Amino acid sequence: MNRIIYIIIVLSLPLFTFSQINKDSKLSDTITLEKVFITATRTEINPIDIPASISIINKEQIESYPALNGDDLLRMIPGLNVDRDYGIFSKNSGITMRGLNSAQRTLVLLDGVPINKTDGGSIDWNRINPDNIDKIEILRGAGSSVYGGSAMSGVINIITHKPIKDLSGKFKAFYGSDNTSGGSIFLDGSKVKDEKGMYWSVNGFYRKGDGYIVAPDSTYNSYSAKTYLKQYNTGAKIGYQFNRNNNLELDYSYNDDKMGDGNKIIEEEGGYNRYITNFVRATYNGFTDGVKILANGFYQMEHYVRQNETIKKNTGKYTLYNTDAFRRDFGMWLNASKHITPNQNLTIGLDIKQGNVDSQDNYKTSTDILTNKGNMNFGALFAEHELSIFHDKIKIISGLRFDIAQFRDGSFTIDEPTGLTDFMTNYPTAFTNNTWTSISPKLAALYQFKPNCKVYVSYAKGFRAPILDDMCKNGNVTKGFKLANPQLSPENINNIEAGYVFNYKDKIIIENAFYYSIGNDFQYFVSNGDSVNTGGSTLKAVMKRENVGDARIYGTEVMITAKLNTHILLMASYAYQQTKIISYYSPSTDKNLTGKEIMGVPPHIFSANAEYRSKYLSFVITYNFRDKQWEDDDNIAFSQQRSTFDGRISFVYHNKYYISELVQDIFNSRFINSKGELSPGRFLMTSLIYKF
Amino acid sequence: MGFFNTAEMHFTTNRRNEIVGVLTILCILIMLSCKKDNQETPPQIEFIKQIGYIWSDTTLPIGAHVKVGIMASKSNANITYFNIVMSANGTSQIAIDSGMNTSSFTFNYTIYKGVSDVETWTFMTMDKERNKATVSLTLKRSAVTNWGNVKSYNSVILGAQNNTVNGSFLSLNSGNTFLLPQAFLNQDSIDIAYYYGAPPTYYSNTLSSPGETQAPTFFTGANGVNNWNTKNTTMYFMTTITATQFDQITNDSLLIVSYPLTGSTKKSKFVTTGQVISFKDQTGKLGLIKVIAVNGTDAGTTELAIKIQE
């Protein structure tokens, strides 16, 4: 009943707004195309001059798309696979692309600095407030020649808002399905006069929701509980513009999000995952004697807290434990670029970074305490050369990067073991320091056959550093019981691709890329033949991540954008990706994955968006299709196909007051994920916004 | 000039007082808002001091048993763990290891005096904040050991679940076997159940009991174990005792020594001829089973010899 009343109210709100619109309706806003792209070279460059497959999501799209989290926006980008199975109640989201199935293989930058955690390789997308994003740049294909680790399948750069006006602000309140509500404040100002002065912004964001039962009827039991959500997010930015070319900026953000895991036995809050993140970035942009300098310092500290409550099916034994993990990543990225001749630009850079983890599994229903620690130091030098010839019609980019990394001070200890963990003492790990290097070359060329039209070819190498979690932590994983392997080395990929962009008077744009990649030293869990009793209903295979696989991946992506007039934009994108493990060379393994496909990679992804935008109204409807994909390395079980329609309609009054209705999964096509848990289905959210 | 100085001075003083006042209020607010540090008060644990229990150091003959009662309650945080550790001759064994999440509990435990001269029994409880509390007692072995008598069943034939001649259920008290309908009528006395599960899904010839998880899946229907009101549980442990050693048993000394504090299970899987299996029944009586023969089908039989404390 409440839901019906809610829907009626939501549907009636636009009618009120329409009555205001018709008084002085005048269409003026237009859909614009972005002219600057930073992510490809770490310098500003016109997107048409980049010999690579790229995409940009601009501010207007961010404000009008049916996105509740930053990663929702990426669904419209060809080749990107967004895993957010529980919608707004997902503890995290996995973004993958180009046939590579792990979020660790995609580098994510926030204002140009890396936010992939060295411990697990992923990022906490929930901490990215969509209201604070100005633009997202996506570079598909290996990008390690500029960025180093994680840039195997591509790079996503989230660029936050930079204040321009003297004073502006945005206040938002929202309410939606599953009793989800919250609000946000955004204030910023700029005192920059004559290209000199200070600018600032502050923002705060809060949301909470009751969540929903993730257990389907077949597994529902008395311990099934709603996956609730509680999130606080705040940030501040301050910058000073010394002159046109010199700028210093300091950015801080804090996020605290807690999500119920759908189980509640005795503890009031049940099982949950909580991420508390502090992030600081300092950036200097300078220009002296023809040299552009970009210096970034960053510090990210994530405190991950997990409460886990379980009842073992076979024994009825109750277990309660907490995980406290402190994951730090900090470093400094420096690069300088100079036009050494009018048609040649050279960029050189030095990157240093350290990532570490100090994590503890603290059992409450036994005395066991498991502690794992580890550090990874990274250092890198790179150079990139851009050459333009034949009146800028041909552009050649070549680059080379040398990375060195050292794993050190790894440890895994068990204090006060009971029968729950003392079997682990049979598998002691020799934690020796481990150093490895990687050289990542790149060569790419494009030809502009018409203005805003290009054809390009490129070769690039990418790699992913092993993650600390695999190097220094023993523990249960879905497939068995994992042992730490401090001797892991990076995964590598060599990628060649060709593509074109055809632009007909900015009205129809066709972008198409074909790629072929060979991956080496891919990491898989390899069983050592032992099985252990970890307290569950079955014995678990003892395994370790090892560099054992080579893979072949190829595919194509095509995106067609049609701008029918200044108010209507249609977009459709399709990606085909085919993967195969071409060799599997573990000496100790009891299985051979040669010939199998990489799990978690849908062969076909399709999305389409229709967007209407005017001064008083914006309307977006999106369709996303994801083909079935293998859920295990052995290619035995696969997930269902998924297709969803999402939509958002926003009405504007006097360019200050907004009312917005967002619906995800309009047709309520709920699916069951690989964990046997339900998606949320249709989710509505109404927002009231005041801007000045 | 002086006027201005005075005014400026007054202003400065007032301003200073204002600032001091604001700071003082802020400090008070901060202090008030600060949570009190969690006092690390451990949970309370004590022996039950009633007739029928022991709660202090005692001397016992081997094989004698005493009952210990434990009462525990939380201080700050719920109690989440309880264990019993027996230490003797420089080694320790965990006898009970149990997770929970409760404000209080009571627990009764029967200690069977083992062969060691001195045993220290420590009862530990831990709360969610990992605060621990313990009580302990020492059991000394008396100079004179009076081994207990054993009752022997030299040939017990149990049928598997589809055997319509030989019963699958055994009463250790009487030595009688029962088919399912009769066993249903004698639930209180049934201690052992025998079934055959096709490997690898199940565990071939299996000694079990009504209280074991999978027994109801083999004995179904109106009289099925799921419908029993009383489901006794017998715990098993595979030993390395030989058939000859078993045959030479005249008192309960080997029965006591062979049953471990930990490691026993609710079923003994893959039973084969010649094995000697230690057990403890629902009442705490210890025994040994020698497997004389097995005929592994779902309508097959197993022949056992059994010795149990009187």
Image (spheres, rainbow, N blue to C red):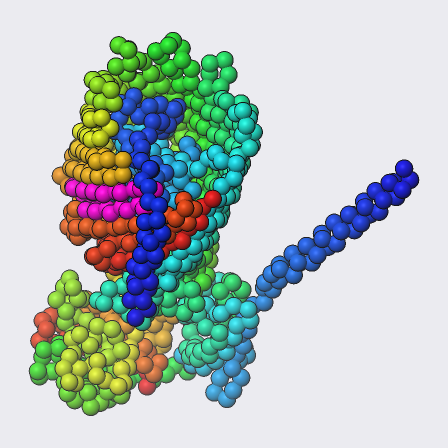
Query: In the displayed image of the protein, which residue is found farthest to the right?
Result: B2
Q: Who's the residue at 32% across and 86% down the image?
A: B310
A483 or A205: nearer the viewer:
A205
Q: Quadrant of residue A493?
A: top left
Say if A442 sits above or below A60 in the image: above
Horizontal side of residue A518 vs B129, given as left or right = left
Q: Who's the residue at 33% across and 30% down the image?
A: A34
Q: Position of residue A657 (x, y in %)?
A: 41, 49
A218 or B99: nearer the viewer:
A218
Horizontal side of residue B291 vs B284, given as left or right = left
Q: Who's the residue at 44% across and 70% down the image?
A: B101
Q: Quadrant of residue A677?
A: bottom left
Prevalent SS, magenta region: strand
Say if A342 sits above or below A611 in the image: above
Magenta-colored span = A597-626
Horizontal side of residue A403 vs B152, given as left or right = right
Q: Position of residue B235 (x, y in %)?
A: 30, 74
